[in-house]
Amino acid sequence: MRLLENGEEFFPRVFELIAAANSEVLIETFILANDKIGQELQTLLIAAAQRGVRVQMTADGYGSAELSSSFIEDMIRAGVRFRLYDPQPRVFNVRVNLFRRLHRKLVVVDNDTAMIGGINFSTQHLREFGALSKQDYAVEVRGPVVADIQGILAGTPASASRRRRFWRRRAPALMAALDRATGGTDALLVTRDNHAHRNDIERLYRLGIRSAQQRIVIANAYFLPGYRLLRDLRNAARRGVDVRLILQGNPDMPIVRAATVALHDYLLRGGVRIYEYCERPLHAKVAVIDDRWSTVGSSNLDPLSLFLNLEANLVVRDQAFNTTLSATLDQLMQKHCKELSAEHARNPTLVRQALSFLAFHLIRRAPTIAGWLPAHAAKTGVTDLSAGSERVARN
């Protein structure tokens, strides 16, 4: 396991692996931009395909909607298999495929080394982008779990072909799998889709929180979870666990700020400590619990990630990796965050409570309601541009 912070550490390592690939490169991302990073990735993928490496690139149709046809065609002509998730035509130059996004960020090279996290292929993840550059993390991993990530990218996960009945609780089974695991580092790929794995990521978070004995630190860009997870955090703080949240100090949408005020009041009164990261936009989706449990991935704790998107997190039980991630988050809190005082939650006005309540529930319910519309039905899938308009995978 190796923690990678921001594009400065992530991109050089990914590009190094692609340049040395012998047999296969599989990549899945939400945003592939036609900028310095996207162009370097394109060059390396074309070179890999030309020397006989099997290359598959999958991007989201909404997040990567700005890609030009020539950018994609150059890769296809070189032998790269290029796929778009749910591509939709614009209506009055507006992207209409707002929901059910392919939000995973995964890389597998030669079925030997994998990357998973929240970093897109865009210069927005580099400091040189400026004040709006993003703070985020990924993890490089080798070992048996790479085969699981490779299976997701190949579109052949074992449980993708059937729905899981609502009474079959998967999360305890996942935790049991971690308990049974052996070796220096225990790692488990946890995904969210709209078929068999609707709630796995949220349940793993909740089980980890409920089992915490000393410490919980969650850094999450968009933090609007359901009441059960919020209640679990308050209960953990009340039983003496040091619970800390690192959240966006300057959300990019005012309604998000209004909704989070209600959460701040509720959590601060329960003993949860909240740190606002104000230096740059926070894009992280990571957590540590006690001295062994960690997770790094693409899933926010918000309605889009928990109810609609395709997401992937790696859950790790390893003291050394936990120590590394904990130290990184501690430094973030100490040097780049401001802590909200307990007084922040005292005596909120009735108007403030009402507005925060309405904003919270509007954000929580809107994506689910919109997901019922035909354009966002769960039948959407991946279009292989290398083979015309064939639908080759489903959400």
Image (cartoon, helix red, strand yellow):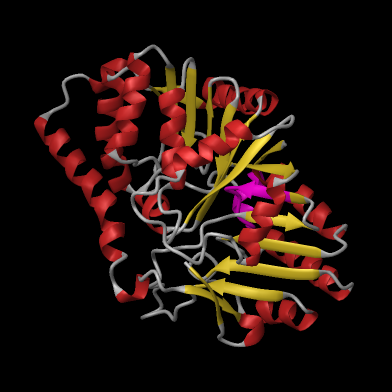
**Residue 133 shows up from this direction:** no
Residue 230 percent location from the top left of the image: 32, 32
**On screen, residue 80 above or below 352:** below
**On screen, residue 135 above or below 123:** above
Residue 27 percent location from the top left of the image: 67, 61
Instruction: Left or right? Give the position of 360 relative to 208.
Output: left
**On screen, residue 132 above or below 241:** below
Q: How many marks?
A: 0
**Residue 25 shows up from this direction:** yes
Q: Nearer the viewer, residue 250 or 45?
A: 45
Residue 366 percent location from the top left of the image: 26, 57
In the picture as drawn, the residue positioned furthest to the left comes out as 350
Q: Nearer the viewer, residue 371 or 189?
A: 189
In the picture as drawn, the residue positioned furthest to the bottom comes out as 388
Q: Quadrant of residue 357?
A: top left
Instruction: Left or right? Give the position of 162 relative to 359.
Output: right
User: Residue shown at 55%/43% (left/top)?
Assistant: 131
Instruction: Left or right? Give the position of 102 relative to 314.
Output: left
Residue 344 percent location from the top left of the image: 27, 21
Quarter of the image where the N terminus is located: top right
Q: Which residues are magenta?
A: 114-128
Q: Does 126 appear in magenta? A: yes
User: Residue shown at 42%/42% (left/top)?
Assistant: 202
User: Residue shown at 34%/34% (left/top)?
Assistant: 229
Q: Nearer the viewer, residue 246 or 232?
A: 232
Q: Does 238 appear in magenta? A: no
Q: Quadrant of residue 260?
A: top left
